[in-house]
Amino acid sequence: MSQEHIDFEYFKKIKLKVGKVIEAERVPKSKKLLRLVVDLGNERRQIIAGLAPWYDPKEFLGKYVVIVANLKPKKLMGLESQGMLLATCTEEGRKKRPVLLTVEDEVTPGAEIC
């Protein structure tokens, strides 16, 4: 499979930060979406994530997650998502299941990934 490469200057434009999840709930009338509020230290962001089929919202509370902080906001089911959680996928039989990327130790919310 061919992979497109980006240069380092382009990569530096992507702002990855650590946030602490302080609220999490299912989005009404959606089977896939969760609404999370993430503390980034100097601000709180609402992030809409398509992880509801695999995660109970309570599992997110207090977790330190990695987010793309400078992604253009987007509306999903009428709610504005102000970032994106990072996850990887693992194979379960014939299906892929997302696995949330988290930070093992407590860090200051809003810390940049460097």
Image (cartoon, rainbow, N blue to C red):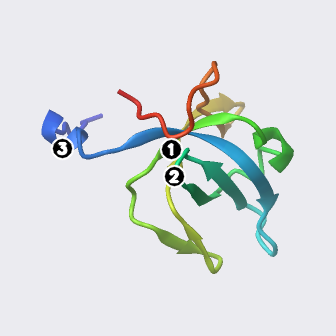
Image coordinates for residue 107, horizontal then vertical, percent? 58, 26
Q: Which residue is drawn at 54% across and 75% down?
A: 75
Image coordinates for residue 93, horizontal then vertical, percent? 72, 31
Image marks 1 and 3: residues in contact by CB distance under 8 Å: no
When the figure is inspected, residue 66 is found, relative to residue 27, above or below; the finding is above
Left or right, 9 with respect to 31, comes to left
Say the numbered circle drawn on residue 67.
1
Say the numbered circle drawn on residue 77.
none
Quadrant of the snapshot with the N terminus: top left
Image marks 1 and 2: residues in contact by CB distance under 8 Å: yes
Point out the residue furthest to the top here: 105
Q: How crowded is mark 3: few (under 14 residues within 10 Å), some or many (20 or more)?
A: few
From mark 1 to mark 2, how far is it between C-alphas? 5 Å
Counting the numbered discs, the total is 3
Q: Residue at x 64, y 24 (%)?
A: 106
Q: Could you tell me if residue 8 is visible in this image?
A: yes
Residue at which label 3 appears: 10
From mark 3 to mark 2, how far is it between C-alphas? 18 Å
Quadrant of residue 72 within the rendered picture: bottom left
Q: Which residue is drawn at 63% across and 80% down?
A: 78
Image coordinates for residue 4, horizontal then vertical, percent? 21, 40
Residue type at numbered disc 2: Met
Residue type at numbered disc 1: Ile
Point out the residue furthest to the front here: 42
Q: Nearer the viewer, residue 85 or 54?
A: 85
In terms of secondary structure, where does tag 1 sit?
Answer: strand
Residue at which label 2 appears: 84
Q: How crowded is mark 1: few (under 14 residues within 10 Å), some or many (20 or more)?
A: many
Q: How crowded is mark 2: few (under 14 residues within 10 Å), some or many (20 or more)?
A: some
Residue type at numbered disc 3: Tyr
When the figure is inspected, residue 65 is found, relative to residue 53, above or below; the finding is above
Quadrant of residue 14 within the rendered picture: top left
